[in-house]
Image (cartoon, rainbow, N blue to C red):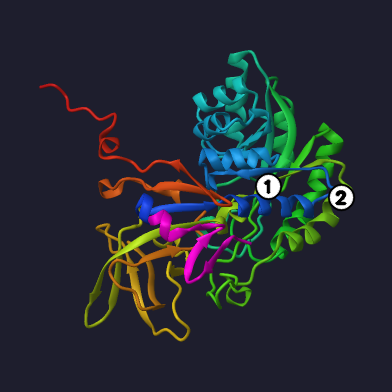
Amino acid sequence: MHDFSYRDGLLYCEDVSLSELSSRHGTPLYVYSAHTIRENFRRLDRALEGLDHRICFAMKANSNLAVLDLLGREGAGFDIVSGGELFRVLKAGGRADACTFAGVGKTRQEIEYAIREGVYSFNVESEAELFFINEVAGAMGRKAPVALRVNPDVDAQTHKYISTGKSHNKFGIGIDRILGVYEAAAKLPHLVIRGIQTHIGSQILETKPFVEALQKLLPVVKELQSRYGIEFFSIGGGVGIVYHGALASSQASWWQQAENKSISFEDYAVAVRPLLDDLRLKILLEPGRSLVGNAGVLLADVLYIKQTPAKTFVVTDAGMNDLIRPALYEGHHEIVPLKEPTSGAKRAPVDVVGPVCESGDFFAQDRELSDLAAGDTIALLSAGAYGFVMASNYNTRRLPAEILVDGSRADVVRERQVWDDLVRGEKIPVR
């Protein structure tokens, strides 16, 4: 699941001390484990062995070029949601014909760019988008490959902000209308129907929603095979990771399954393969969080301990601009010190907060943690997905650096911003 553990009282990522990294590079600091990412990809790939499939990494989870390069070398394709993400894939040495282009608001410029580069398929989210892609492709004298995203109206039992498969979500075309929209697509002269796609949400912790969605969609998929000879069925991503848990002992696993139920890739494959094995279609998957989430941590220094009659606040140098998940949708991250607490160490409820001028700038509230003091460094676990990619310069704060650890090697894969970066591109008009 991960490659983070205590050794001789200090927290390590693979064979590198996180204390050494924080001392050398400063904080806030993102650190990723290359081995964890590789092993997650390989486990999913092995679980699907024998099924014609392609794993397209949903790079909105983590778009660092080094991470894309690492996964590309493992054979991954990419699920992209913007022209910028396609640009990143190409800069990392990836290929457009291994990319599926999702998203509800593709612009003319993005569509033209993807057509020129030879994207494998546009995952079309609406009738309006379908006609627009046809128009853009026609103006270019080209044909655009498309797959319609079908919304199966399945409740993924996840947070409302990351649920995408219900009829009231903005994503996809309703299953009750999908065949009619394919009929319209087949009549458009500048489109090539290549497949069908679905995605019901993120951080899903049981197999039932996946199975329910596939069962509802299989008759549609088979009808599309018969009518249009589609090449692929993209079943999306969404397998959740373990966020809750505690460190049981030195050299032990970070996350205890009892704290937060989850499903393994093997569980997932056992559940969905009986529905897919006989389709004779390429099956595309779009995992993001499940490949990189537990592979990253955010390191932060404790600045102050603030005591009030009502609360104890642990004030850190990382803020919601560095990791917004707790503020955005109450995302949970385990918080541990880089120095291993002694057995039986005192614990007390605290709020772990950042320096940003917002009351929502917190990482934990009323969380029982071992005693911390100014100068300590903490790690926010499971920060490899939707961490840096959602970071901002709010409060004119510099973006943190990113480190990729591979065995005993630690490379800076993104430099920390300098002051001049904060105003780059801005100009004061001459008056």
In this view, 395 is above or below 120? below
Q: Position of residue 30 (x, y in %)?
A: 44, 52
Say few, some or many: other residues with alpha carbon within 10 Å of mark 2 (under 14 / 14 to 19 / 20 or more): some
Q: Position of residue 87 (x, y in %)?
A: 53, 29
Is residue 231 found inside the magenta-colored segment of the image? no
Give the side of residue 309 with respect to residue 269, left or right: left
Q: Residue at x 44, y 77 (%)?
A: 341
The residue to which callout 2 is attached is 277
Q: Which residues are magenta?
A: 1-22
Q: Is residue 323 visible?
A: no
In this view, 262 is above or below 308? above
- Residue 67 or 214: which is nearer the viewer? 67
Q: Secondary structure at mark 2?
A: loop
Under mark 1, the amino acid is Thr
Q: Residue at x 44, y 63 (%)?
A: 380
Q: Quadrant of residue 81?
A: top right
Total of numbered circles in the picture?
Answer: 2
